[in-house]
Image (cartoon, rainbow, N blue to C red):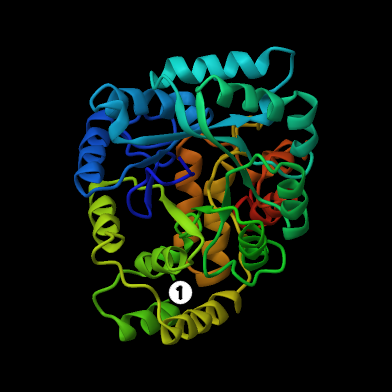
Amino acid sequence: MAAFDEVVGKLGFGLMRLPRVGEGEAAPVDVERVKTMVDAFLAAGFTYFDTAYVYHDGASECVAKEALVDRYPRESFTLATKMPGWLLKEPGDVERIFAEQLERTGAGYFDYYLMHNVAGNQIKMYEDFGCWEWARRMKDEGLIRHLGFSCHDTADVLDRLLTDHPEVEFVQLQLNYLDWEHDAVQARACYETAERHGVPVVVMEPVKGGTLARLPEDAAALLAEADPQASQASWALRFAASLPNVKVVLSGMSDESQMAENAGLLAPDSFKPLTDDDRALLRRVVEIITSVEVVGCTACRYCTPGCPQGIDIPAIIAALNTQRRYKDSRADIMYEHALADGSARASECIACGQCEGACPQHLPIIEVLQEAAGLFDKEG
């Protein structure tokens, strides 16, 4: 069976930003609410669930078992997870992590398995640990049905990876209308590279970590004038889902209302692809957004687990971006809220560089934290 033949609809449930019991990143996942969302997702006819070894500090795969695998027939859904190359330190780590993933999820096998963030220095890591050869063996044993990888890198790198690994059946890319022509992200070029290789695409960050659901007022007004009933996020999801070679658009839905909206929007019998006029409108929105330079953080949180100072980098960047864009007291409130959640101050950064090595957006985080410290830690 070809990749995605068994997937229904283009919406994928990304188990990355799940609802929590209480506030803050340390709060546990609200499994009962996730069950409700899983039920609604499947009832709407969708089947693709996406998790990873590192999401929610490992809890995401366990939640997938409790909310999905233990409650539904295995053939009624498809499950994707990922091998974290940056955690591979010793011989046998690949087998150990994969065994943990099978135990955590209870899935028996994975419909879609990805090498996680194959980019930059990570490329050599996956080669050094024999991950590609290992994955082919797992396919032969039926433990992996379809093999792919996620990538935050240039189109040239993607082209080389797809050329070197013809066994790859799909690729997961960051695609959204804000990054479509971005010189660094190269979303259009990466999409076209995958298309040229005949490799289908799974979209991550279609709303760019929520950025495209919280537009500046003048950009939001343009979309509201065009369609008063449509949410800002819906435009971003429609953009990604309208691309012909896109098979799944992942949405990290964190509450029931997001699930209901997205399921209705991308339902196969009611989905409305973007028109040429819609695309022109989104280009005007991009012009407005990019007129104010902000830090392109998607709040993936890959940077935070290894921070020796315990800095909530995404929360501090969100405060900095609010200051850059709006220049009002909301930024100070957001910064203090980040500290109240247990984060060290931006000024406590020791410039070790761990965060920059982990960031899939290749952001100059040390420099960004220095800017935030200058704005928010004036007395610290």
- The local crowd at label 1, few if under 14, some if 14 to 19, many if 20 or more residues have their Cα within 10 Å, is some
Who's the residue at 59% across and 69% down the image?
180
Q: Residue 212 or 78: which is nearer the viewer?
A: 78
Q: Residue 2 or 174: which is nearer the viewer?
A: 2
Where is the N terminus found, in terms of image quarters?
top left
Q: Residue 94, located in which quarter of the rendered image?
A: top right
Q: Position of residue 265 (x, y in %)?
A: 28, 63
- Which residue corresponds to mark 1? 216
Secondary element at image label 1? loop
Who's the residue at 42% across and 63% down the image?
241
Q: Position of residue 191 (x, y in %)?
A: 61, 62
Who's the residue at 59% across and 66% down the image?
179
Figure check: 23 above or below 284? above
> Is residue 21 in sight in this rendering?
no
Q: Residue 16, located in which quarter of the rendered image?
A: top left
Q: Residue 146 or 368: which is nearer the viewer?
A: 146
Where is the C terminus found, in terms of image quarters?
top right
Q: Is residue 99 left or right of residue 160?
A: left
Q: Position of residue 90 (x, y in %)?
A: 74, 14
Figure check: 331 above or below 75? below
- Which amino acid type corresponds to the residue marked 1 in the rendered image? Pro
Who's the residue at 72% across and 59% down the image?
155
> Is residue 180 in sight in this rendering?
yes
Q: Position of residue 306 (x, y in %)?
A: 65, 30
Q: Is residue 39 left or right of residue 292?
A: left
Q: How many marks?
A: 1
